[in-house]
Structures are given as C-alpha cells and as structure tokens.
C-alpha cells in the first residue's frame, strides 16, 4: 500500500507543472460549433509563449505555462474553467468569449486577477475607473462600429444622410454590443439603421437575406461568429449583394468565413485591429524555435491566419504586461495583483513592436488607471478570392470618441451604480 | 399586385424550399424510428460525419493525420490526390454502411429488448463519440464542400416572374436541387419498401418485431440495413447543408431543425417528414416576415417549435403518425 501511495505521489509530482512557472491559463475551444475559430486563436496564443520559453527562457527568467481548459464557447463551462484553474496561480484570463467575459468580470474583480479581452467582451470595461481588473485594449466593439461608419463616411464624401445601413448580428450579448453606438451614429450622421438578428448558430439565414434583398440597404455590417459568418457571406453572394458594401467586424473577418463561399466572397471587407500573414520577422524565430522544433500547438496548420495572428497578438500583450509587472515589482515571479498593475501601466510603442518582430502589426497604445481601452483604431481589409488572401486597404482609422466616450461613461456608470462600485483614479 | 403580396409569395416559396432541407434531415430520424423504435439523437452528427468524410476523401486528406504525426513524428496531411465528387460520394456511402455495421455490432446488439429510453441514451453517447471521432479523423477546421451543385439565384425564374409581376422572385438553385433530390429520395424509399424483398422485411419489422422474427427475418440485418439507409440519407443532408455553409461542427445542429418537423409530421411517416418540413419551413418564414419586425426578429428557431406544439395539442401522433391505441 505504501509503495502504491509513494508511486502515486511521485506520478503526481512529475505530472504537476513546476510551481515557479508563470501560469497563463488558455481558456480555449477546440470542440463544438465554434471550434474552427477557437483552434487557430489558441494555437497562436500557445505558440508565442512557447517561443518566449524556448528562445528567451521565458519572461525575466520565468517560464510561462499555458494550461488549456476547454470551454466549447459555452459560458457555464468557461466559468467552470475559471474556478478550476484560478487556484493554480493563474495570472490572467483571456476567455475569447463575450458571454464568459460578462460572467467573469465580478469574479476576477473579487479575486484581483486581470481579465484581458482584446477586441471583445464588455465594451465599457474600457473605463478603468469602474472596471479595475478588466482591460480591452487596443480596440473594442464600439470602436469597431465607429470605425466602420467612419470608413463609410470617407467612401461617401463625408455624408451618409439618407443612406440605409443594415446590421446583421448574432442574436446574443456579443452581437447586440454595437447597437447603442450605431444608433447614436445614425442620429449624428442621418443614416437609417436596420437591425437584423440571426439566432445562433446561424446555419439558416434565408429570411434575413430575403429581407436585405427587399430593403436594399446601401451597406451591410455584420457582427457574426462561427458558421453564421460563412452562411451570411454565401447568402449575400447568392442574392448578388455587392461584396464591397458588406463589412464584418474583426470576428467576421477570418479565412474560415470567406473560404466556404469560394469566388462569391471576393471583395468582402472586414475590420482588422492587427496585421495578418507571415511577412513579419517574428516568424523566422517561430519557425526556428517552435515549428521546426516540433513544438507547434495543435496540428500546426493555422500559422499566419487571421485568428492565429490574433491569438499571438493577445499573448504578446500579456507577455509585455508581465514584463512591466516584473519591472514594477522588482521580481520575476509575479502574482496576479502585480500583473494587474502591469496591465495598467503598460505602454507598447511601434518601436517596441518592431523590436518584438512585428513592425506595423498593431497600433501603439498606453494604458492608465482611467483608460483600459486604448486608442480603438482599426483598419479595413478586403478578401481576394483568387489569391485567397486578405489585403489591408486602409491604414488605422481612429474611432469617433465624441460619440463613444459618453456611451462608455454612461454604461460604466450604470454598472458602477448597480454594483455599488466607487470610482477609482481620483 | 402590391409589393407586400409579392414579398409574401417570395417568402412562402423560400419557406417551402427551406422546409425541404429540414425534411432531408427529418427523413433519417423517421427511417430509424419506424424500423426500430429508436429516436436516433445521433442523426445530425451522422450528417456531419458523412460530410466530413466526403470532403476528406475528395481532398485526399489523411485520416487521423494529427494523431499519426504526434505518435510517429511524421508530417502527413494529404495523399496528394483529388477525387471526383461521384467517387468520393460512393466511398462515403460505403463508410456509412460500414458505420451502420459497427453500430449494430458494438451498440445495438447489446441493447436488444431494452427500454426505448436506454436506446435513446445510447444514441446520445453515439452522437458525442462520432463528433469526437470526426474531429480526430478529419480536424475541426472549416472545409469547403464542392460537389458541383449550383448555388445562387435562379435567373430564369427571376426573369419570368419579373416579366409577369414586375418583381423578380428569388429562389436559390441549391434549394431547387434539394427539392429534386428529396423527391427522388422519397420515391426510391417508397419503391424499395413496397417492391423489394428487403423493403417488405423492413416493413414487417416496423409492424411487429416478434412476428417478423418468427417468420425468419433477421433483426440484426434489418438494423444494419436501416442504419445504412439513414446514413446515406444523412450524407445527402450533409451535402446539401454543407454546400451552403461549409463543413464545420455546427452542421450537427441541423438536427434541431428536424425536431419540429418530426413533431408535426409524425415519427413514423416518410410523407409526414416531407409535409411537416414544408409546413414548418413555410410557417416559420411567414411568421418572421409578418411578425418579426414587430417583435424584434429572430423568431424562426422558437416559432417552429410553437407551430409543432400547436399541431401536437390537436393531433399528438403528428399529421401522419400512427394513432396509438392501448386497450386494457
């Protein structure tokens, strides 16, 4: 019996990661209806930390562990993953789900763990005065809505008066996020906003696209995820809606969304909050230390795709926040509270991005106690179906802060009042 | 003719076409339930598995490549061929027959004479197993399915209706193909069950298991046969739905679209699956058209079930289902 117990203890000791590691749980989804989006993101996230471990020996001499927990893009499972992993010394969470984010906000605040939600989650969390532990830089949904409208303003000589813009959205907390912003922008610029919800998962959208065929909007914006995107693009091609007038948010702008529609998707546009493809120096290091060394995450077949790039970008920002936290605290083995401070003091310049092997990949930003949302700029990319590539057709476009700031302040103030949160940073 | 009437006509037509797509999924449920009394929860996953296998064969993808590479340190992904669609479809149909034999051998055979709820539970297990197997075999990335089916607006129909009504009505070419395929499928199944030896055996088992056994019909063979046919029907559904959206794991959720069709049409009637599909498709689309704008849209998923529920209240066995009379 004693021998069995000793063997069991030894086995457990060898199976448990070394306690000195920096633990960054990867709440991923590699199964279920949204796996096609979850896999490349998780792979990019893991591969970047593997690169830091293999090339640099970790961050500040501390290796980074990214234990995965499968959420299947299910909110309940996401919360279970949080509860199951937070005791392992988890430093930060990035659940890649707006639904999970909403559930985790009160939990991470109580546990003083940072929650990093780049380009998704609760938009008004950009207000650091209310949301002490949530960071959503460099851009959020409301920024995306504003950038899309600014782009359309540019396309129409600065005037959208009398235009009709349809919003096809995933009928969920995520899909409904841009509606307040677009409504405010519609009032400001005089365009008509038509809201067209699509129930999850969005496999059947005939009614929605017949409505678009009847209503003849000038532009269609899309807030979709998973199969909804591919079906929408196919249906738009079927009704011969001009693809250059169809713009998706960055979660509706990956290869998964356009490839199933083949040539029909040619000309489709989407927002982009970062670059994509493998034309960045960091890939030489990734090849040497990760891919060729057989240490790729998953099947290793997602490298350079839009969502792989986004997962990698999230890992890069987290690693830079860890560095900042190490610098502030004066030691390498930081805890979650110290990392929160690192996130709040983080600044990433273009020079630093170039140093990291990703020049002109993401926008420079600086966080502060008040501002957890960053500048919110985004680019527009367009799909070339014959070359099967995305091309950036604009530089970074800044959002309309005149409209967004009051919305962020209003929503965060309501949250603060509901939850008895006293404003910080005074 | 007013615009509203023309739009309603277009919505009705497209609703009927969408209903055919739902019926294709519902048919697989009916076949298995009719022959064995099993509500096959795995029918949607069968469609997904069939579509994944078809694309895998077509593109020459190495099954279990990720697993093989991880174990042996190889770098296998593709065989380097691209099979014609017809060959890939035949091979996939063969895989579905093989799968039926495996299901019978390792699951159903061990559950003979068990309560229907146990068999239902077994199909839930089977659904999740097949989903995982499909993932390991072919990967979870989204795949384009192209077997040469036409897609997009039918221009001839659009031109004719435009000249008659002054408004070109929209019908998707893929939906027209689905309608023809569904009609052929129902015709073939009817001919098979009425005029072939095995078809008659299948009907005998559906009527009375014990009596069929007593005249020497092999229940095991019939189960393999009916699961094979359901697998091939799932392949057809997988091709139609996969052509619309690409092949990805939410394809298994098309089963949710078949449930109200079954509730309405009855679990034991092939014509019921077709008529049920048409009513559900048309009903949900017309409701969305008229009531959607008033109540915020996205009504189709729940309204289909409300419609089915209404039918159930007045006709619990469904439109074409057999009335259950138990005498004490």
Image (tube, helix red, strand yellow):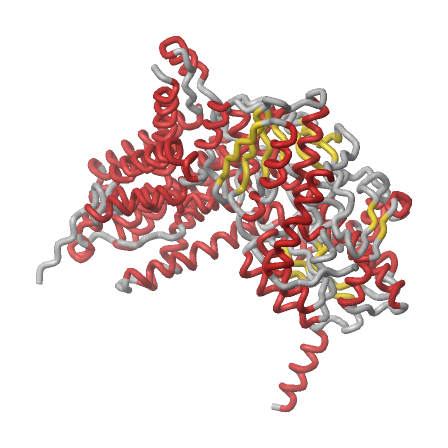
Answer with left or right where residue B2 lies relative to residue B91: left
Please name the residue shown 20% across and 55% down the image: B209
Query: Does residue A121 show up?
Result: no
Q: Looking at the image, is B198 positioned above or below residue A81?
A: above
Answer with left or right where residue B252 lies relative to residue A226: left
Please name the residue shown 77% across and 54% down the image: A370
Please name the residue shown 29% across and 34% down the image: B186
| Residue B85 x, y percent position in the rendering | 50, 31
Residue at the bottom extreme, as displayed: A2
| Residue A384 x, y percent position in the rendering | 68, 27
Q: In this view of the protein, which residue sits in the foreground, B297 or B178?
A: B297
| Residue A333 x, y percent position in the rendering | 83, 69
Hey, which quadrant is residue A340 in on the image?
Answer: bottom right
Please name the residue shown 39% across and 30% down the image: B178
What quarter of the picture does the C terminus of chain A occupy? bottom right
Q: Looking at the image, is A215 positioned above or below residue A305?
A: above
What quarter of the picture does the N terminus of chain A occupy? bottom right
| Residue A116 x, y percent position in the rendering | 71, 55
Total labels: the figure holds 0
Residue at the top extreme, as displayed: B163
Query: Does residue A313 show up?
Result: yes
Answer with left or right where residue B270 lies relative to residue B253: left
Answer with left or right where residue A243 lies relative to residue A55: left
């Amino acid at each position: 019996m004693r021998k069995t117990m000793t063997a069991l203890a030894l086995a457990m000791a060898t199976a448990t990661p070394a306690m000195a590691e920096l633990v960054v749980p990867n709440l991923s989804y590699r199964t279920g209806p949204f796996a096609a989006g979850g896999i490349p993101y998780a792979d990019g996230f893991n591969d970047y930390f593997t690169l830091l471990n293999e090339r640099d020996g970790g961050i500040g001499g501390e290796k980074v562990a990214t234990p995965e927990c499968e959420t299947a893009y299910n909110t309940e499972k996401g919360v279970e993953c949080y509860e199951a992993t937070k005791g392992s010394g988890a430093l930060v969470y990035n659940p890649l789900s707006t639904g999970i984010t909403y559930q985790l906000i009160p939990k991470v605040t109580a546990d003083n763990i940072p929650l990093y939600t780049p380009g998704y989650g609760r938009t008004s969390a950009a207000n650091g005065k209310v949301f002490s532990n949530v960071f959503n830089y460099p851009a959020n949904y409301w920024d995306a809505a504003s950038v899309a409208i600014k782009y359309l303003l540019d396309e129409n000589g600065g005037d959208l008066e009398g235009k009709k813009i349809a919003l096809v959205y995933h009928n969920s907390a995520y899909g409904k996020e841009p509606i307040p912003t677009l409504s405010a922008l519609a009032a400001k610029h005089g365009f008509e906003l038509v809201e067209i919800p699509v129930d999850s998962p969005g496999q059947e959208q005939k009614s929605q696209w017949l409505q678009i065929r009847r209503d003849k909007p000038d532009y269609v914006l899309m807030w979709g995820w998973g199969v909804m995107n591919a079906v929408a693009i196919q249906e738009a091609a079927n009704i011969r809606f001009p693809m250059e007038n169809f713009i998706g948010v960055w979660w509706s702008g990956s290869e998964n969304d356009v490839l199933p529609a083949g040539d029909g998707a040619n000309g489709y546009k989407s927002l982009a909050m970062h670059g994509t493809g493998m034309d960045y120096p960091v890939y030489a290091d990734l090849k040497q230390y990760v891919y060729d060394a057989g240490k790729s995450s998953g099947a290793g077949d997602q490298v350079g795709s839009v969502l792989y790039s986004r997962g990698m970008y999230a890992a890069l920002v987290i690693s830079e926040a860890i560095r900042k936290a190490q610098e502030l605290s004066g030691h390498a083995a930081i805890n979650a509270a110290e990392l929160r401070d690192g996130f709040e003091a983080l600044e990433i310049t273009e020079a630093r991005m170039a140093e990291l092997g990703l020049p002109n990949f993401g926008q420079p930003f600086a966080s502060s106690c008040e501002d957890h949302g960053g500048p919110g700029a985004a680019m527009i990319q367009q799909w070339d179906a014959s070359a099967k590539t995305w091309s950036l057709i604009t530089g970074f476009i800044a959002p309309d802060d005149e409209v967004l700031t009051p919305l962020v302040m209003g929503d965060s103030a309501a949250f603060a009042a509901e939850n008895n949160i006293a404003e910080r940073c005074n | 003719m007013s615009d509203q009437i023309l739009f309603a006509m277009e919505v009705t037509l497209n609703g009927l076409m969408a209903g055919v797509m739902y019926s294709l999924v519902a048919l697989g449920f009916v076949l298995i339930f009719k022959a064995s009394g099993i509500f096959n929860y795995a029918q949607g996953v069968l469609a997904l598995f069939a579509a994944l296998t078809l694309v895998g064969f077509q593109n020459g993808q190495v099954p279990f490549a990720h697993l093989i590479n991880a174990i042996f340190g190889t770098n296998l992904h593709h065989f380097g061929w691209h099979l014609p669609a017809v060959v890939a479809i035949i091979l996939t149909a063969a895989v579905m027959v093989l799968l039926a034999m495996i299901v019978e051998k390792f699951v159903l055979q061990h559950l003979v004479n068990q309560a229907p709820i146990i068999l239902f539970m077994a199909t839930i297990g089977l659904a999740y197993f097949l989903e995982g197997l499909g993932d390991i075999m072919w990967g979870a990335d989204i795949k384009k399915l192209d077997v040469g089916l036409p897609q997009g607006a039918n221009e001839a129909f659009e031109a004719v209706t435009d000249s008659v009504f002054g408004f070109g009505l929209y019908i998707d070419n893929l939906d027209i193909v689905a309608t023809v395929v569904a009609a052929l499928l129902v015709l073939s199944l009817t001919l098979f069950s009425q005029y072939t030896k095995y078809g008659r055996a299948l009907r005998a088992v559906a009527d009375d298991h014990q009596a069929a056994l007593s005249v020497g019909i092999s229940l095991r063979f019939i189960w393999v046969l009916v699961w094979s046919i359901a697998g091939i029907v799932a392949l057809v559904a997988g091709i139609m739905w996969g052509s619309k959206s690409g092949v990805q794991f939410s394809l298994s959720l098309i089963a949710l679209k078949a449930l109200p069709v079954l509730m309405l049409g009855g679990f034991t009637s092939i014509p019921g699956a077709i008529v049920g599909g048409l009513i559900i498709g048309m009903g949900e689309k017309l409701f969305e058209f008229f009531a959607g704008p008033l109540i915020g849209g996205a009504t189709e998923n729940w309204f289909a079930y409300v419609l089915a529920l209404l039918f159930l209240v007045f006709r619990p066995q469904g439109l074409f289902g057999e009335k259950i009379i138990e005498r004490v």
